[in-house]
Image (cartoon, rainbow, N blue to C red):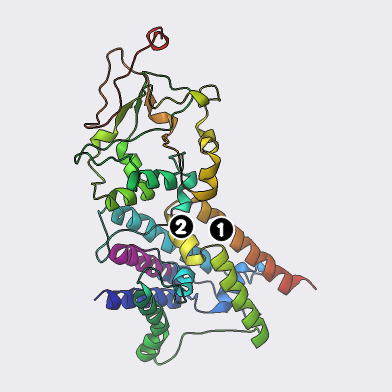
Amino acid sequence: MVATSFTPMASLVGGALIGLSAVLLMWARGRVAGVSGIAARLFPPYEDGEFAGRLAFVAGLVAAPVLVRLATGSLPLQTIEAGTVILIVGGLLTGFGSVWGSGCTSGHGVCGLSRLSPRSLAATGIFMAAGMATVFVMRHWS
Amino acid sequence: MAIFIQFVIGLIFGLGLIVSGMSDPAKVLNFLDVGGIPAGTWDASLAFVMAGAVAVTFIGFGRILRRARPFLAERFYLPTRTDIDSRIVAGPAILRDRLGIGGVLSGAGADGARIRFFFRPHLRRGDVCRHDARALCRQPAVADALRRAGRSTRNLRSLQRVEITDENYPESSARSPPTCRKMRNDIPDDTKRTGRRSSSGPFCLTSRYYQRSSPTPTPTLTPGARMPTPARGPSSQSR
């Protein structure tokens, strides 16, 4: 595993930016900023004519590291230890789980919790606990 | 315009992820690694990201959802399934259905809103069911439905008092225990399956909005509604 440093202030500020983004999306389009939902609805069926907006949102997400690269000259640090197979399996499971659970960290964890939704609280607790259990098994179960 | 705004919103989200360090999977994994707490490798940053984000959205959503509609859309699209456990116990998904489509908010004038209640058993004929219309309208599902019906979400005085009459008094539930928690179980089975009520059905609000009726008949504030004047039987007189 790779050690990471605890960054409370940067994380708080970054979290506030994420919150600002969610608030702006609600203000502009009246929609919840659930990244998994937005990404999932890039695929058919297209029922509500929001495809272009969702694509723009995802494009903005992808453009963020590009902007950072242009501004600072280096891409943000990413440390990925897992192999390709694990990444593919993990990505599929993540996508499946977030669609099945109708939300992810942003949809349930941020938008749902801030709306005091019990469902989102349950979902957030469950996926955090499941993630912790998975990491525990992968790292300490030997 | 809308497309560009959503691009910028996505960009802000992405920058938030980068600034918070959450673009690095190792940080997320180290947060999830509670087994690393003893060794000191646990990274609590993700909790701070969540705290920062929820703090902003909690305040921001509260303000924005009071508006009639979003800046660049017809209405708010909020998950409604979430609200089933909220303070309106009867299930706002159904309430929304009734308000938006059914005859509950009947087509009478701007303030001719009419609401029917799924009364609690401890309510009796002649009682006045009072509720805080503002609290009701703050429920996202209800506010959403009101907006779609072209109604104000602020001025709903007509919704504030409804008298329990023969028409809306449910005999069938008269003997079940007076717990509001049980409300969802009172919704007919087809509701649970389909999310819709087929029968003409009333709703309820939480019990804290109830009060006893005054001896004088309170007019139902529903102009144009068919709700009959309550026939005050001996049962209500004796109380």
To which chain does the residue with label 1 belong? A
Q: Where is residue B163 in the image (x, y as percent from the top left)?
A: 33, 24
Residue under the image location 40 percent in, 88 percent down:
A66
Q: Count numbered badges in the picture.
A: 2
Quarter placement of the C terminus of chain B = top left
- For mark 1, give the secondary structure: helix
Q: Residue placed at 41% from the left, 30% from the top?
A: B208
Q: Are marks 1 and 2 in contact (CB under 8 Å)?
A: yes
Q: Residue farthest to the left?
A: B109
Residue type (three-letter) at the residue carrying disc 2: Gly
Q: Is residue B35 visible?
A: no
Q: Quadrant of residue A131?
A: bottom right
Q: Residue A127's x, y, as percent?
A: 60, 63
Residue receiving disc 1: A123
Residue B85 versus residue A9 in the image, above or below = above
Report how far apart the C-alphas of labels 1 and 2 lie in the structure. Answer: 9 Å
Q: Position of residue B197 (x, y in %)?
A: 46, 43
User: Given the image, on which type of amino acid does mark 1 rest?
Assistant: Ala
User: Which image quarter: residue B2?
Assistant: bottom left
Q: Is the magenta stretch mostly helix, strand or loop?
A: helix
Q: Residue A109 carries which label?
A: none
**Left or right side of A65 for A80:** right
Residue B168, placed above or below residue B83:
above
Residue at label 2? A112
| Residue found 28% across the figure and 40% down from its top | B106
Within 10 angstroms of label 2, few (less than 14), some, or many (20 or more) residues?
many
What segment carries the magenta color?
Answer: A15-31
- The residue positioned 68% from the left and 65% from the top of the image is A133
Expressed as whole percent of the image width and height from the top left, the position of residue A104 reads 52, 66
